Image: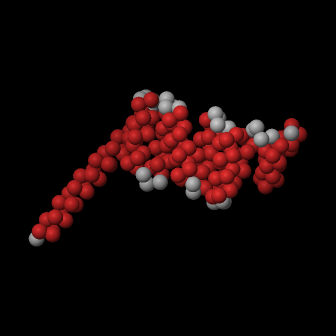
Amino acid sequence: PAVLRQQRACLESESRVVEAAALTDRLATEDRSDADLRLPALRRLASRGELEPARALARELIADFPDDLGTLQGIAAQLQTAGALDDALELLRRLAEECPQNPQLHHSLGRMLEDHGRRDEALEPYRRALELEPQNQPLKQYLDFLEERESLEQRWAVDFESLQTLAADA
């Protein structure tokens, strides 16, 4: 394995990506205990939109690395890329419950929800992240912006309903 790792590093330095990926897959087959060797296969499946194979590999990786927070976050990101949003959100929610004091997890969950148009749901994880990390000024400013936007949208919805009622009565 050490020689194969050196060969892979040489291939990568020479920008021989396909050969390096094949060698990484071979190394991953020989050493299933190294998440860094196995995650690239998930990235490739996700980037090609191969949903079911990506889900299967993600389940395998989750089972093999249940306590490796960085690996689990990477799996969630790749599931999102593959289009398995519900799986990705389920994993991030579970991680946020298991590690409630980790602001990065709450922030990641909020970002993923927001990226998929679920802004209302994103506010709570963002608030929790800011509660855990009150010195995070960019997050505070962004959360203020989102809350202001939500407030305006609610007022506009009420105003629109009032206009519809007036128009119906006229």
Residue 140 in view here:
yes
**Residue at x 13%, y 65% (from the top left corner):** 166
Q: Residue at x 22, y 60 (%)?
A: 160
Query: Where's the C terminus, which quadrant?
Result: bottom left
In this view, 118 is above or below 105? below
Q: Residue at x 69, y 50 (%)?
A: 57
Give the percent coordinates (x, y) of residue 44: 69, 54
Using residue 149 as the reference point, say whether residue 105 is left or right of it: right
Quarter location, residue 129: top left
Q: Position of residue 76 (x, y in %)?
A: 59, 46
Q: Quadrant of residue 164?
A: bottom left
Q: Foreground residue, 33 or 63?
A: 63
- Where is residue 116? Give x, y as percent: 47, 54
Numbered label tally: 0
Q: Is residue 64 left or right of residue 126?
A: right
Residue 59 at x, y percent in the picture: 65, 47
Name the residue at the right extreme: 3
- Classify residue 76 as left or right of residue 156: right
What's the residue at 81%, 46% (across, down)? 29
Q: Residue furthest left?
A: 170
Q: Is residue 45 left or right of residue 77?
A: right
Q: Is residue 14 visible?
A: no
Coloring applied to the structure: secondary structure
Compared with 74, 166 (above or below) is: below
Q: Which quadrant: the N terminus?
A: top right
